[in-house]
Image (cartoon, grey):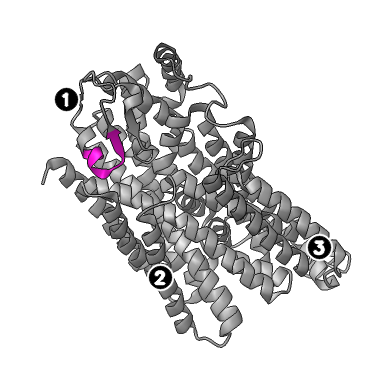
Amino acid sequence: MDSQFLVSLVIILITFAIYIGIAVANTAKQTSDFYVAGRGIPPIFNGMAIGADWMSAASFIGMAGTIMLLGYDGLGYIMGWTGGYLFLAILLAPQLRKFGRFTVPEFIGDRFNSKTALVIAAICTIIISFTYSIGQLSGSGVVIGRLFEIDARIGTMIGVVLIALYSAFGGMKGITWTQVAQYVILIIAYLVPVIFMSFQLTGNPIPWISYGEIVTKMGELDRELGISEYFAPFTNASKWQFLALMFTLMCGTAGLPHVIVRFYTVSTMKAARWSGAWALIFIGLLYFSAPAYAAFARFILMTEVAGSQISNLPTWTQSWVDTGKLQVADNSGDGILQWNELVIANDIVVMATPEIANLGMLVIGLVAAGAMAAALSTAGGLMISISSSFAHDIYYRVLNPQASERKRLFVGRMSIVVATLLAGIIALNPPGAITQIVAWAFAIATGTFFPALVLGVWWKRANAQGVIAGILVGLGVTLAYIFAAKYGGFTILGIIDTGAGVFGATAAFLTNIIVSLATPAPSKELQDEVINLRYPEQMVYKDGEVYLNDGSTK
């Protein structure tokens, strides 16, 4: 057992002990604890939990690698994922909190007074969360595979067992407070290496300022090698793909069920708004750092690895070759590793960077712990989302309304175990890179929930027939485009599978509006309830008048 492995293992075990201790101390004893943490989470801590829930393996492991490989074109991920929180905090979160339900499908079912809409929304939640969880389990496999120097697929199955046990135990209450600890660990783990690299390469420990200098130097290297310049826009994708990806990720963020449910865990509309504000700050720390991470890692690879003798490569390369995520080959036969002969998966850039930059065993172990925190925190939220959609929305609200709390908790926990196992089997041979798989989940959310929620909150004329038709058409168009683009080579304006949400959302909005106008309007009570969502919590709209909670007219 080498010292690097031992240090990483000890750090990960310590963090796991912290997570388990918090989960045990906050075990869910009733359904409100299991699904919405008793609605008692303070906004600043909820912002941290949202940050941890949000900064998944795709963000922690895949983001910097994607930007490193795509350059300018990779910025669409950062702008889309961050900008979506503005949509969510302004357009939806406070209003959904005022409606006061447990889940997004429950809001849709009650807002439109339709069990059919409830079931369809629950199925969509399961599809979105399941797709997203494949990316998280694949990410955990990368971390565990490198730690134990085993195939990433074996690491994935180890991750399945860990995540299933962890998610089923505490419910939303336990997961929320665990996510606060996970956020602290993952953000420290993410920032320490990039600060060290910044100081190593530029003498300036502030990476957000210094990485521009490195990008300029890389432009010179790119010209020498005759490859596309790192910061040249639209060299890896079309302008339309860039815009479509941004739109898909923004609207998908505002429609993700496992993110929206976090706003149900606070006590008021005001607390929901502040949760969104804190989340943006906490998320921004990582997302502002990702471009610097990417630039530093690429520069070190170009200057210290490429151009080396194949027989004298750094020792870290063999460890990553063993995981199947790194390939080196002397295709030219000159005994020198050329830049174009180095094939590095974007999923390993952050994990490999401490070794690439020779930052020491402690930092390597810290990054491994942070990556596990990212995968676990998001996986936990996703599994709760799947569980609540099946156990609460379908089982309790439709199939067995008389079920006891104990039975509901049992069904919820079992659905987590089954969903994790199924997602893990698919993650053994993932259909794409982590960021790509996650982008599909966002595309589906964009095509289904974003139009349904925006119209459900802001258009009182939207009715059950409209939302059902809109969700089904949006889902069909999004999935059809993803499969056609990925497996059939079909594109419109150069928009590939990760930008499919723009077509799904357009189809869903149009379908919802046209069908709603062609069918009877909702009842006056439902329309009043929709208008009521737009007023502060202490006000109530009824019969054309706005009242304070004490009954007096405003």
Q: Which mark is residue 515?
A: 3
Q: Which mark is residue 14?
A: none
> To which quarter of the image does residue 134 belong?
bottom left
User: Whole-Å distance between the Cαs marked 2 and 3?
Assistant: 37 Å
Question: Is 48 drawn above or below residue 41 in the view shown?
Answer: above
Crowding near pointer 2: few (<14 within 10 Å), some, many (20+)? Answer: some
User: Whole-Å distance between the Cαs marked 2 and 1?
Assistant: 46 Å
Q: Is residue 475 magenta?
A: no
N-terminal label among 1 and 3: 1
Foreground pick, 479 / 525:
479
N-terminal label among 2 and 3: 2
| Lateral position of residue 540 relative to residue 277, left or right | right
User: Whole-Å distance between the Cαs marked 1 and 3?
Assistant: 67 Å
Q: Residue furthest left?
A: 1
Q: Dot 3 lies on which element?
A: helix
Write the residue at 49% across / 57% down. Answer: 131
Residue range in magenta is 319-327
Identify residue type, mark 2.
Val
On the image, numbered disc 2 is attached to which residue?
418
Question: Is 30 drawn above or below residue 285 in the view shown?
Answer: below
